[in-house]
Amino acid sequence: MKNNKIDIKDLNKEELASWLSQRNISSFHAGQILKWVYLHRKDSFDMMTDLSKNLRNLLCEHFEIKRLDKKNIEVSKDGSKKYLFTLDDGNHIESVLIPEKEHYTLCISSQVGCAQGCKFCLTAKIGFIRNLKQSEIISQVRDIQEDINNPSELTNIVFMGMGEPLSNYKNVIGAINIFTDSDFGMRFSNRRITVSTAGLVSILPNLGKDTKVNLAISLNASNNNIRNTLMPINLRYPIEKLIDSCKNYSLSPRKRITFEYVLIKNINDSSNDAKELATLLRPIKSKINLIPYNAHEGSDFMRPNRDNILNFQEILIKSGYTVFIRESKGQDISAACGQLYCKS
């Protein structure tokens, strides 16, 4: 028998309040219900003891509070955990829990597969299957909180898993609003959430207007010739349009845009590439994450040697940039940047 119940995590507070009002129930209860779902992480309406029995029964008739099916959890030697989730339609997504010194960062997915076709990314080989629902995005965080002894230690969320977040804009923004709601949501700080995009210029300005989370641009080249080869999106939105959009992006006074640059041997790792990158980003308040390429099966790309990586960083530092070399965790379980593939 088909289940027609709605996952209540697909509704925001206003939508739930409207649903209640249409049934002559005080909209005040919407906040109570969401507190039980997000702050207390309860999975049953029967546990919501400050609601009347009649209201609990009504909610049970129409809604559910779903968990994702954790099909597999792999643990890296560095402590990272890769979660393979099975969705209701049989599709799969992956999320990666990354231990830091005093907290955890969770890398989450926004789509099943990805349509962007970036040549260095294993997820691209899946192709695009579908967008994740708001509830499926939220559940990655909510469910993994249960696996942490102290859930409050999960403080950072990065949209750097499977998919292009800006291509699933409505549901990503809906999830972010739940994550950052300090009254009825999950109480994450805007400063601790990062959305990474390949550069959907037509949608990018909306992100700065609709939320104050951090922005990361997956750039990976300093000119159109190389970026066209690595990232097909550059054929639609050339690098000049992307940079112009970043220059006009609505940033809080103390924030900077992070530019992610995957270093690939003999492709984009030369001294000239570094100098060109320094010139390209000059008009933008920015910092740079250098990501040495993470190899995966079937790819001809290679990781640069250590000297080339350090030389690239040094050129950018001398040009006045803050530059980090991001050694991706979870490489031994294919959980590093660009390695998510959902081997079910």
Image (cartoon, grey):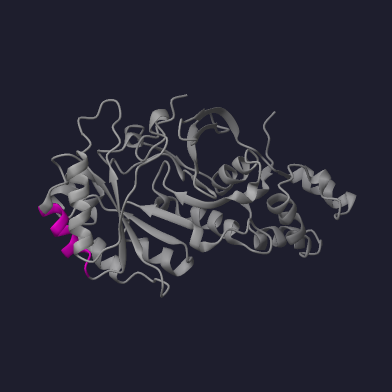
Residue 239 lies in quadrant: bottom left
| Magenta region, main secondary structure | helix
Does the rendering let one see residue 237? Answer: yes
Visible residue check, residue 235: no
Q: Start and end of the magenta stretch?
A: 272-282
Q: Quadrant of residue 259?
A: bottom left
x 17%, y 57%: residue = 315
Report x, y in % for residue 159. Answer: 45, 49
Q: Could you tell whether 1 is left or right of 94 in the image? A: right
Image point (63%, 38%), residue name? 147
Residue farthest to the left, as pictured: 272
Report the residue at 73% width, 50% height from top: 40
Indicate the position of residue 182 as horizontal and vertical percent values.
64, 64
Outermost residue to the bottom: 253
Q: In this view of the protein, which residue sits in the foreground, 57 or 113?
A: 113
Q: How many marks?
A: 0
Residue at horizontal 32 percent and vertical 37 percent from the top? 124
**Camera-side residue: 104 or 211?**
104
Rendered-image quadrant of the N terminus: top right
* The one of 269 and 132 positioned closer to us in this rendering: 269
The verdict on residue 49 being magenta is no
